[in-house]
Amino acid sequence: MFHDTFGHLPLLLDSTYAQFMEEFGKLGVNHIYASDIEVLDFDLEK
């Protein structure tokens, strides 16, 4: 918990980096759903 809070949170408070990470995550999800790999069905809109 200490590492996550003091290691990752400061990076995510930078709006440019946070936006990059959000877009990077969306690309990954789109790639998974566009491939033939079987994935767990989960709702990303929650």
Image (tube, rainbow, N blue to C red):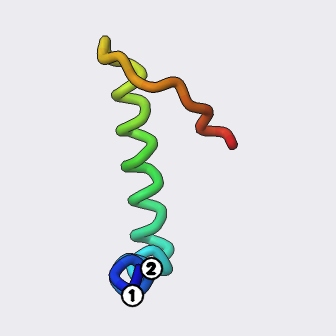
Quarter holding the C terminus? Answer: top right
Coordinates of residue 28 in the picture (x, y in percent)? 36, 38
- Spot occupied by residue 45 in the image (x, y as percentages of width and height): 66, 39
Is label 1 in a helix, a strand or a loop?
Answer: helix
Residue ID at (47%, 62%):
19
**Marks 1 and 2, Cα distance to the nearest angstrom?**
6 Å
Residue at 42% in and 22% down: 33
Residue pictured at 35% horizontal, 16% vertical: 38
Other-residue count near label 2 (Cα within 10 Å), few / some / many at <14 / 14–19 / ≥20: few
Number of numbered discs visible in the structure rendering? 2
Numbered tag placed on residue 9 in the rendering? 2
The quarter of the picture where the N terminus appears is bottom left
Which residue is under mark 1?
6
Residue 26 vs 7, above or below: the answer is above
Residue found at the far top of this picture: 36
Q: Amino acid at mark 2?
A: Leu
